[in-house]
Amino acid sequence: MLILGIDPGIAITGYGLIEAENKRKFSCITYGCITTKPDLHSEIRLKKLYKELNLLIKKYKPKKLSIEKIYFFKNLKTFVPVSQAKGVILLAAANNNIPVSEFTPLEVKMAVTGYGKADKKQVQKAVRIILDLKETPSPDDAADALAIAICKGLDNF
């Protein structure tokens, strides 16, 4: 089953697509980031995110989408744009009839490392091992998206 993991953001949205055969067998199909320029108006940035995400969905046809749940914020300036980006992502999933699951960062860390307070490097290493990658996925946003997809894969079986 193809699972698309998303780490939402207005400047950088990480994505990771995995094939989940069962709870123990995952493979990486692709990963990367959708970026928008900060000098553009938010509606243009959101439109670009929506358009590029739809291109990914049309190309790979994932069966599930998993996304990070926004439950905590340190800065209201980042909370609102991330929430807007998440709304666009949910709309793209709904328009393509893809069921969505949400996971907190704690749930993702527990799923991939077994430790809810794992740091970024521990998560990246676990993702590399689980997906049998030669290199650690980069940037952080893409690695996080792969971890979110793995979390759904573990949850699905």
Image (spheres, helix red, strand yellow):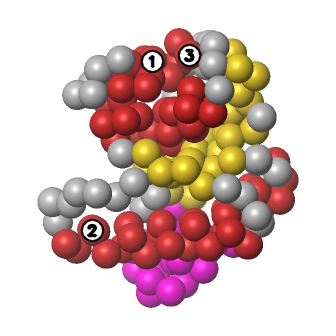
Q: Which of the numbered marks, if any, corresponds to residue 126?
A: 1
Mark 1 in CB contact with mark 3 (< 8 angstroms) = yes
Residue drawn at point x = 43 percent, y = 26 percent: 111
In the picture of the structure, the residue carrying the numbered disc 3 is: 130
Q: Residues within 10 Å of mark 3 (few under 14, many from 20)?
A: some
Mark 3 in CB contact with mark 2 (< 8 angstroms) = no
Q: CA distance from mark 1 to mark 3?
A: 6 Å
Q: CA distance from mark 3 to mark 2?
A: 31 Å
Q: Residues within 10 Å of mark 2 (few under 14, many from 20)?
A: few
Residue with the most extreme left position: 74
Depth check: give the residue in front, 106 or 17. Answer: 106
The amino acid type of the residue labelled 1 equals Ala
Depth check: give the residue in front, 154 or 55. Answer: 154
Measured as percent of width and height from the top left, residue 34 is found at 57, 58
Local secondary structure at mark 3? helix
Residue 142 visible in this rendered orientation of the protein = no
Q: Quadrant of the C terminus?
A: top right
